[in-house]
Image: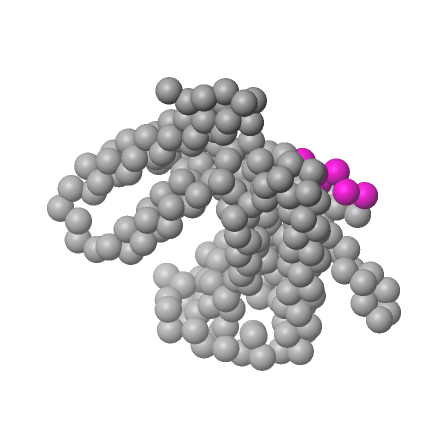
Amino acid sequence: MNEELTVTSERVEKLAKNFSRSDDFVRVMTYYRCAIMEIQTKLNVLNAEFSLQYDRNPFESIESRLKKPESIVEKMLRRRIPLTVDDMEQEMTDIAGIRVICSFQEDLYSLADLLVEQDDVLLISRKDYIKNPKPNGYRSLHLLIDIPIFLSKGKKHMRVEVQFRTIAMDFWASVDHKLKYKKELKDPEIVVEKLKVCADTLARMDAEMEEIRRTIDSGGETE
């Protein structure tokens, strides 16, 4: 096998160390951080306005992350993307990420729609894994957004992935992620099936909680 195409942890670590030290890489990652801050500010403003109008906050928490250099390099090598900062920006869409955790599914969609309706926000893609869950049961709404950041010498457009989940969806995804790192499972198919059942159960719970909230908002009573 060609050594240049072999993806090993040692090779990834070595390349990532050199790649992340370049001035271009440091600069672009700073731009991604700025883009995350821009979207977080927009979401916080919407949250404050929403709480005044409806007397409740649409989301529980916001988490953000930048992909680590090792993960970036590993993915670029695996996809045979040239290891340059320009190619990283053009080919990778998940370097900057924000996760918005909501109590209710309805608020999740409302918040996502309000965000993309803003004049300076460009929606690149929308993947609704809530209405169309992945085969393993994963549910979340993914938006890939183009957002401008304003610099001393002009503005630059950056891409950020924003994920919207309910508390239940986030709980399931977190547990599923942790279990993926478990080794030597005797019956992995059984575990996968049980996780799928749990995902479906949590989806029904989300729907029931939504119905309870609507009943309360309308002045009715739950049974």
Q: How far from the left and from the top, in percent, is residue 193?
A: 25, 34
With respect to residue 212, does 186 lie above or below? below
In the picture, measured across the screen, residue 82 lies left or right of residue 181, that is right
The colour scheme used here is one colour
Say which residue appears at 75% left-offset and 46% top-offset: 121
With respect to residue 217, does 142 lie above or below? below
Of 81 and 118, nearer the camera is 118
Q: How far from the left and from the top, in percent, is residue 134?
A: 42, 34
Instruction: Name the main secondary structure of what is drawn in magenta.
Output: helix
Of 8 and 161, nearer the camera is 161
Picture quadrant of residue 173: top left
Of the 4 image quadrants, the one containing the N terminus is bottom left
Say which residue appears at 52% left-offset and 42% top-offset: 102
In the picture, measured across the screen, residue 140 lies left or right of residue 191, that is right
Residue 66 is a magenta residue: no
Q: How far from the left and from the top, in percent, is residue 139?
A: 44, 36
Residue 112 is a magenta residue: yes
Of the 4 image quadrants, the one containing the C terminus is top left
In the picture, measured across the screen, residue 169 lies left or right of residue 125, that is left
Say which residue appears at 69% left-offset and 56% top-offset: 41
Q: Residue furthest right?
A: 153
What is the count of numbered marks? 0
Q: Is residue 182 visible?
A: yes
Of 28 and 58, nearer the camera is 58
Q: How far from the left and from the top, in percent, is residue 110?
A: 63, 34
Picture quadrant of residue 50: top right
Q: Is residue 89 visible?
A: no
Q: Residue furthest left?
A: 186
For the record, the magenta segment spans 111-119
With respect to residue 69, does 204 lie above or below? above
